[in-house]
Amino acid sequence: HSHREMWFQELFPPNTCPINAKPNTFYGIMFDAGSTGTRIHIYTFVQKSPEKLIELEGEIFESVKPGLSAYADQPEKGAESVKRLLDMAVDAVPPHLWKKTPVVLKATAGLRLLSEEKAQALLLEVREVFEESPFLVPEDSVSILDGSYEGILAWITVNFLTGQLSGQNQHTVGTLDLGGASTQITFLPRFEETLKQTPADFLTSFEMFNSTYKLYTHSYLGFGLKAARLATLGALDTKAADGQTFRSSCLPRQLEAEWHFGGVKYRYGGNIEGETGFKPCYLEVLKIVKGKLHQPDEIRGSSFYAFSYYYDRAVDTNLIDYEEGGVLEVRDFEIKAKEVCDNMERYSSASPFLCMDLTYITALLKEGFGFRDSTLLQLTKKVNNIETSWTLGATFHLLQTLGITY
Ligand SMILES: O=c1[nH]cnc2c1ncn2[C@@H]1O[C@H](COP(=O)(O)OP(=O)(O)O)[C@@H](O)[C@H]1O
Ligand SMILES: [Ca+2]
C-alpha cells in the first residue's frame, strides 16, 4: 500500500482531520448519467491513523434504467430517478459528514446527442435535486463530461486500481470502454513515432497524483453499441422512423419487433427472404466502421483492459464468467459471432441483437481500431471490488480541485 499512499499525501494532509468526526472516513459521491442508465458511486476513503495517509476503502454502487436522455421531454421525471439514487447516499453517509461530502453528476453520450435545450433542462432539474440534498454541491456539479475526459478518467481508474500509477515501474495499461452511444480508447504512448502519427486532438496532457500523463484518447460519438445498432439498421439516416421497418441480415429471419432508444421508437426485423448469418452481417457492420476510426500502429501488439459492453456481451455468450471476468483474444469475439450468427434460432431467446452486437464488436476491434486477432483483452468489471468506471478518476480529480482536506 505504501506507493498508493504516497500520492494521497498531497490530497489529504494527515493533520487536517477533524477530531470530532469518527476521525478517519471521507466520502465522495459521483453520478454517471450514461446513455442507458444512471449510476451512483459512493466512495469511502479512510485515514487509518493520523500519521498514515488516505486510502480508498470501498464503494457503494447502484444503478437505474433508463438513462436521463430517455426523459428528454420530462426533465422532472429524469431528476426524480437521480433523487431515488441520492436517497441511498443519505443513508450511507453518516449525517455529520453530509456537509463535507461532495456530490457531482456527469452525463455522457446520451446527453451529448440531445439538443442543447433539452440537455440543459435535464441538468437544471438535477441541480435542484442536489441543492435540496444535505450534501456539498460544488460549482458546476452537474454537467456534460467531455468525451476526452471520459477516456482519461477511466484510464486513471483502471491504472490506479491495478497499482500502475505509483512507484517507479509504471507499466500502464490501455483501456477500451464501449458504452451505449459512444466508445473510448485510451493509452499512454510509448513511442515517439506514435505521437508524430497522431492528430493533435487525440493527445491530452493530464495531471494526477503529481505526475503528468500525455495520453492518446478519443471518444467516438455514435459508435457505442446501441448507436451502432441503429447505424447498422440504417435508422439514423431516416428522420421519419415511424411506420418503416428496418431490416438486417444480423437479425433472426422471422423477427418483427420494436425498440425504444433515445426517446424514439424503431420497428425492426430480419431479412425475411434475403441472407442472414455472419458473412452478410459482417459486411453490413463493416460499412459503418471501416475507415471511420484512427488506427495507431502502436496498439496492434499491446494488450488492453476492456469493460462495459465488451464485458457484458462476453458474459452473455459464456466467453467469461460474470464475477471473474477473464482474458480473451480479439479472435474469440469473432469465433463467437460466427457461432451465434450462423445459429440464430438457438440464440435469439437471449437477445435478438446478440449476433449484431458480437459482429459489431469484432469489426470495431479489427477494422475500426486495427487490433490483431491475437491482441489480448483483459475483460474486467471490478478490481479489488471497485467498479472499473471513469467515476473513480473523476472523484480523484474532484477532490483534487476542491482541495478537500476535511
Ligand atoms: O459502473 C459501472 N459498472 C459496470 N458497468 C458499467 C458501469 N458504468 C457503465 N457500465 C456499463 O456501460 C454500458 C452502458 O454504457 P452507458 O450507458 O454508460 O453509455 P454511454 O457511455 O455511451 O453514455 C453497459 O455495458 C453498462 O453495464
Ligand atoms: Ca459509460
Image (cartoon, rainbow, N blue to C red):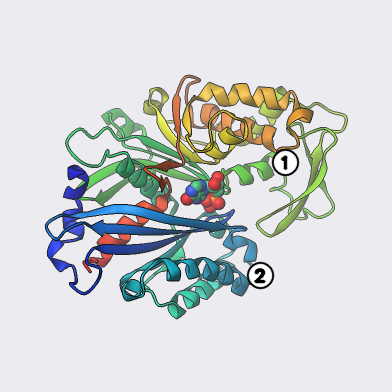
| Front residue of this view, candidates 11 and 182 | 11
User: Residue 335: x, y in percent?
Assistant: 61, 21
Left or right of 194, for residue 229: right
Examine the rendered structure and indicate whether residue 109 appears above or below residue 188: below
Picture residue at 46% right of the left edge, 35% below the top: 294
Left or right of 268, for residue 170: left
Of labels 1 and 2, earlier in sequence is 2
Q: Secondary structure at mark 2?
A: loop
Residue 75 lies in what quarter of the image? bottom right
Left or right of 324, for residue 11: left
Picture residue at 78% right of the left edge, 27% below the top: 276
Examine the rendered structure and indicate whether residue 144 appears above or below residue 294: below
User: Residue 117: x, y in percent?
Assistant: 57, 70
User: Residue 115: x, y in percent?
Assistant: 59, 64
Mark 1 vs mark 2, foreground winner is 2
Q: Secondary structure at mark 1?
A: helix
Q: What residue does disc 2 label? A: 73
State the quadrant of the C terminus.
bottom left
How far apart are the two marked residues, 1 and 2, measured between alpha carbons? 25 Å
State the quadrant of the N terminus.
top left
User: Residue 191: x, y in percent?
Assistant: 28, 29
Residue 277 lies in what quarter of the image? top right
- Examine the rendering and report whether any part of residue 112 can be seen: no
Label 1 amino acid? Leu
Label 2 amino acid? Asp
| Front residue of this view, candidates 7 and 139 | 7
Picture residue at 68% right of the left edge, 39% below the top: 232
Picture residue at 30% right of the left edge, 35% below the top: 172
Q: What residue does disc 1 label? A: 233
| Front residue of this view, candidates 301 and 54 | 54
